[in-house]
Image (tube, rainbow, N blue to C red):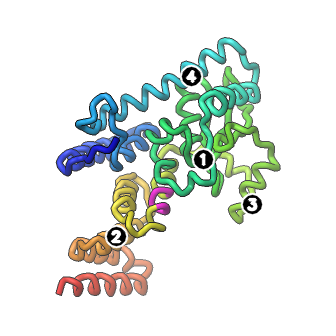
């Protein structure tokens, strides 16, 4: 079934979700699940089969995803009550049995070629996604089930750390992309080595919420950058990243170049000039090149 979203609805959803995204990102305790759901609202939503005439609004999307996470958390709570895991390893095995086994959350190499693998509502629906999105599901479900699960942002591959049912400092590492397979130190060092880096204990520091969101948006930007026809997708991911309190300044240039590519020569050139002013203080050579790009964009108006 295919239902075309009207422009008016799309604009309303985008404005609504961006206002909430900005507010949520600047809260005292940003929720990466909420922010990723709001980011997904920028893309065409999953239509409600019961109401094919209209796509769901932001609140409907959020409620449906929250209900799905709560269902998985209820299954985990039931498994904890039945099995009484005694430590981190048994807790991780329980999560793997429920989420990776019964619910079949996992990933495949082909998922790297799909935008849906970075959109949380689609990950919850398909039970497939990139490592960071599957790890986000594990941490969200674990928190709702009263368990300690942290995301670990290894370079090139996101995993989770699972603590025991009663807390404490002991934990084990698991890979949600591979159904929750437990990882020993050699496994982790191998994953890090695949990215061309050396392992250090600091890499096992729990990932911060906004860093997770920035990395998710970076994955979407990278996916779209390889597909010129997806410039609009790259643009909204870039613009959301710019709404985060901390972000690479070069995202402003990326946005400017996208605007030019999409035909907004004045908007793109103005953004380039603004970015060049930032560069003047520490990189005047690059600032001059950016201003040259801005002039070239304005010349395309003739």
**What residue is pinned by disc 4?**
145
Choose mark 2 or mark 3, whichever is in front.
2
Q: Residues within 10 Å of mark 3 (few under 14, many from 20)?
A: some
Magenta range: 219-223
Residue 177 percent coordinates (x, y): 64, 44
Residue 28 percent coordinates (x, y): 41, 38
Residue at 64 percent of width and 40 percent of height: 176
Res. 131 mark = 1
Give the farthest residue toward the front.
1
Choose mark 4 or mark 2, whichever is in front.
2
Residue 106 percent coordinates (x, y): 62, 41
N-terminal of the pair, mark 3 or mark 1, is 1
Secondary element under disc 3, as helix, strand or loop, is helix
N-terminal of the pair, mark 4 or mark 2, is 4
88 relative to 1, above or below: above
Assess whether mark 1 and mark 3 are in contact (beta carbons under 8 angstroms): no
**What residue is pinned by disc 2?**
258
Quarter holding residue 230: bottom left
Is the magenta region chiefly helix, strand or loop? helix
Residue 222 part of the magenta-drawn span:
yes
- Find the distance from the CA under tag 3 to the CA under tag 1: 17 Å
Res. 199 mark = none
Secondary element under disc 2, as helix, strand or loop, is helix
């Amino acid at each position: 079934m295919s239902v075309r979203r009207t422009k008016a609805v799309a604009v309303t959803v985008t404005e609504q979700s961006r206002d909430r995204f900005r507010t949520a990102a600047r809260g005292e305790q940003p929720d990466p699940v909420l922010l990723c759901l709001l980011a997904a609202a920028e893309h065409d939503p999953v239509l409600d089969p019961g109401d094919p005439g209209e796509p769901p609004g932001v609140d409907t999307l959020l409620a449906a995803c929250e209900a799905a996470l709560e269902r998985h958390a209820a299954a985990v709570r039931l498994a904890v009550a039945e099995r009484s895991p005694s430590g981190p390893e048994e807790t991780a095995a329980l999560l793997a049995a429920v989420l990776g086994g019964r619910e079949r959350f996992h990933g495949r190499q082909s998922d790297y070629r799909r935008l849906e693998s970075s959109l949380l509502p689609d990950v919850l629906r398909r039970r497939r996604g990139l490592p960071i999105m599957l790890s986000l599901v594990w941490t969200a479900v674990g928190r709702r089930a009263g368990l300690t699960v942290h995301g670990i942002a290894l370079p090139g591959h996101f995993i989770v750390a699972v603590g025991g049912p009663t807390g404490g400092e002991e934990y084990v590492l698991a890979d949600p992309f591979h159904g929750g397979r437990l990882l020993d130190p050699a496994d982790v060092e191998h994953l890090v080595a695949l990215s061309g880096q050396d392992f250090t204990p600091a890499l096992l520091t729990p990932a911060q919420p906004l860093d997770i969101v920035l990395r998710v948006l970076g994955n979407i930007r990278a996916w779209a950058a390889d597909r010129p026809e997806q410039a609009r997708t790259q643009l909204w991911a870039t613009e959301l990243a710019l709404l985060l309190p901390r972000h690479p300044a070069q995202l402003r240039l990326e946005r400017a170049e996208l605007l030019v590519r999409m035909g907004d020569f004045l908007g793109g050139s103005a953004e380039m000039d603004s970015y060049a002013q930032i560069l003047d203080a520490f990189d005047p050579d690059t600032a001059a090149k950016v201003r040259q790009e801005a002039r070239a964009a304005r010349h395309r108006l003739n």
